[in-house]
Every structure is written in structure tokens, then in C-alpha cells.
Amino acid sequence: MKAIQQLSPAEESVLNKYREIGGVIDHVLINGEGALGSTEEAHREAAILTLDTLQKKREQEVGEHVSKDSLFMQYKDCKSIDEALKTFGNKDLIISIKEEGKDVVVEFKNEHKDPGTYWHMTYKTDGMTGERITMEQFLGPYFDIKTKHLFARGRHRDFLNDYFRAGEEESKKNIVFSAGTSPQHEGYAYSFSEPPYSVRIHGIELQQLFDEMVKTVLGDLPSDAVIYRWNTDCSNYFDAGKEWWGSFFWTLYLPDGRFVGIAASTTD
């Protein structure tokens, strides 16, 4: 079992699109040739490989963006440097700030002089526990299993706290539920479409991207896919989401012999 390094053009395309619109889920595609994908042991191996792949990715990011003297923070689609400054916090630490296309990049002093202090991911395999779950449990309460639609937050000023089937007209008659009565924050559909800072597309565009992700990366989620949910105490990767947004960790085994490791954890 090993992580797939060379993704297909279609896989790369949809994963890049998802990141560009503000998506926060990490997907790790794994060649499960020879594995018994219905067993917890095989899913455990896939889960560990997912964490190992994410750790290597994080260490590469640390190497690119962290030095003993300075750190970099990138603000996506900032309207101005002033907007980034309002978000940054301690302006006394700023070394430089500049615009790069639609983004603003802030270089600031590393007071700890230790690159490992920032974004350093660790994990442990002792105590990792998984449970097999259904497709409905995996997709969660922010997905209509019958119509295969996301439940997405409204964008019109009159419906900002209401949820609709993605792509449907935002009107009172189409409200599925409201923020005050919304279901528990869990499941792949929720983590796909509801990151803390929102995604930059909505309605039918969001639904189409979700459908593309399901078809291309998740193998169209066949009924015989085997899905495990894992505890999130095994890595500091999951710490941020425990503040309020959520931490999620799944492995899927698809009939074509692939596993997909899925992890998400973030905060504002």
C-alpha cells in the first residue's frame, strides 16, 4: 500500500479547483493493491499512510515558508494591504508586506527562532480507533441522500442563516433548516462546503464542484464502498478544529482497489 504521487489530470484539476475556492479538506489517494479493503486492519494502514503523507506535506511547507528568522503568511484574494494589516495582529513583527496578484504576503519576525514551533505536525498510532460507518453517516446531515444535493447556506441578505438545496432558489418555501435549528456539524458534505471563511462559490457552481469531486476523487461513492471513521486524538493536525469547527478523519475503500484518506481540521 502506498500513496499515489502522480494524480490524473482530472484528479489534479478538481483538487486544485477545490483549494482555490477556499476548501479545507485534505484528500490522499492510495494504491491499495493486494489489500483486503473491507478489514479494519487495511483501513488502519491506510489511515496511518494518510497521516504520514500529510506530515510530509506539512514539513515541505515548513521548509518553504519558515526560517530561523522569519515567517510568511499569505492572505488569499485580499482587496488591499490595509485589509491584510487589519487581519494580521501584531504589526511590530512585520518585516515586509507586498501584493502578489490577488494575494497579500506578509513576512514577519520569528520570535522563537525555531521552525518546528510553527505548523509542525506529529502523529501517534497508539490508541487509533476506527469504526465502520454507512454512506449516509459519512456524507452527514448537510446532504440530501435522496436528491444527492448539498444543503448550503443562503447568500442573499434575507437568508444568510438559512440552508437550501444547493442550486435551488433562495426563498422561504425552499428553506430546509435555519442556523438556529441546524443539525450537528459533521460529515463530508458539511466539511466540504462550510469552512470557517466560506467557499467562494455557491449554489449550482458549488453543487457541480461537489459532484465532480465525488465522481473523480471518490469513485462516484458506490454503494459497496467501505468507509471507516477514525478518532482525531492521534495527531495535532486535528487540534485546530476542536476549537469549534470540527475535526474529521475517514478512510474509504473503493471497488477499483483504491483507498482515499480524507482529513479536515481548521478554525478561524
Image: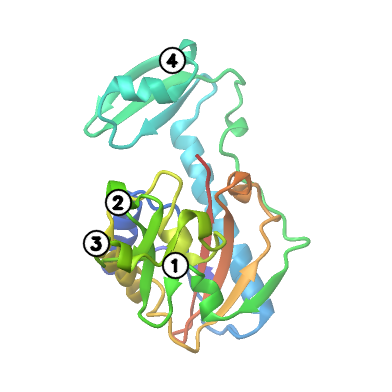
Amino acid carrying mark 1 in the image: Ile
Q: CA distance from mark 3 to mark 2?
A: 13 Å
Q: CA distance from mark 2 to mark 4?
A: 35 Å
Amino acid carrying mark 3 in the image: Glu
Per the image, the residue denoted by label 3 is 205
Per the image, the residue denoted by label 4 is 94
| Image quarter of the N terminus | bottom right
- Residue 32 in sight in this render: no
Per the image, the residue denoted by label 1 is 4
Q: CA distance from mark 4 to mark 1?
A: 39 Å
Q: Nearer the viewer, mark 1 or mark 2?
A: 2
Tag 3–tag 2 contact (CB < 8 Å):
no
Dot 4: within a 10 Å radius of its alpha carbon, few (fewer than 14), some, or many (20 or more) residues?
some
Tag 4–tag 3 contact (CB < 8 Å):
no
Residue most toward the right?
Answer: 127
Amino acid carrying mark 2 in the image: Arg
Per the image, the residue denoted by label 2 is 155
